[in-house]
Image (tube, rainbow, N blue to C red):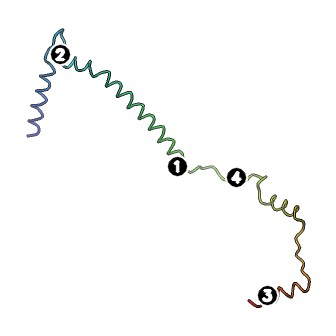
Amino acid sequence: MFIIRFIFYFTLSFAIMCIPIGGGRQVFDKLYSMVTPYARDAAKVTKQKFSSTKRYSKKLYSNSEPSLEEDQVKSKMAAVKKKKSIIKENGPADDTYSDEEQERLRRALSDE
């Protein structure tokens, strides 16, 4: 049933479009000349939207990929140099305790 209806409507619309309206032109030619500027504008806008979407998608995808570059440590920011500069600023550490301080530490540690 669908095929019969399709063939009927296609033939009917084709016959209507072929009706001559004067000057050797048909209804189809008149409609084509009226619709062409709008169709070109629609195609132009669609092409621009696709290109902007493509650019945005590429930018989005490139930002989502992890970089394959290896991590690098700059020598000026290395922890060894920072530690040395801290020691120089504060002077040598006081690691020696008096006998009284050592006794207090032993008692404090043994209580726990």
Residue type of the residue flagged with mark 4: Gln
Q: Position of residue 20 (x, y in %)?
A: 14, 14
Residue 42's disc number: none
Cβ atoms under marks 4 and 1 closer than 8 Å: no
Q: Residues within 10 Å of mark 3 (few under 14, many from 20)?
A: few
Q: Closer to the camera: disc 1 or disc 3?
A: 3
Report, in whole angstroms, how far the alpha carbon at label 3 lies from the one at label 4: 45 Å
Using the rendered view, name the quadrant where residue 52 is placed.
Answer: top left
Task: Tell me how far mark 4 sits from mark 2, CA to CA.
Answer: 74 Å
Residue 10 lies left or right of residue 76; in this view the side is: left
Label 1 with label 2: CB-CB less than 8 Å: no
At x 87%, y 61%, the residue is 89
Q: Which mark is residue 108?
A: 3
Left or right: 71, with 7 as reference point: right
The mark closer to the camera, 4 or 1, is 1
Question: Which element type, helix, strand or loop, lies under badge 4?
Answer: loop
Q: Is residue 56 left or right of residue 35?
A: right
Q: Callout 4 environment at 10 Å: few (<14), some (14 to 19), or many (20+)?
A: few
> Helix, strand, or loop for circle 2?
strand
* Residue 102 x/y as whole percent: 87, 85
Give the position of the C terminus as an image quadrant: bottom right
Instruction: Kindly identify which residue carries mark 4.
Output: 72
> Which residue does the image show at 89% across and 80% down from the upper left?
97
Question: Gap between marks 4 and 1, in whole Å?
Answer: 21 Å
Q: Which residue is mark 2?
A: 26
- Identified by mark 2, the residue type is Gln
Q: Residue at x 22, y 17 (%)?
A: 30
User: Which quadrant is home to the N terminus?
Assistant: top left
Give the label on residue 64, or none. 1
- Of circles 2 and 3, the one toward us is 3
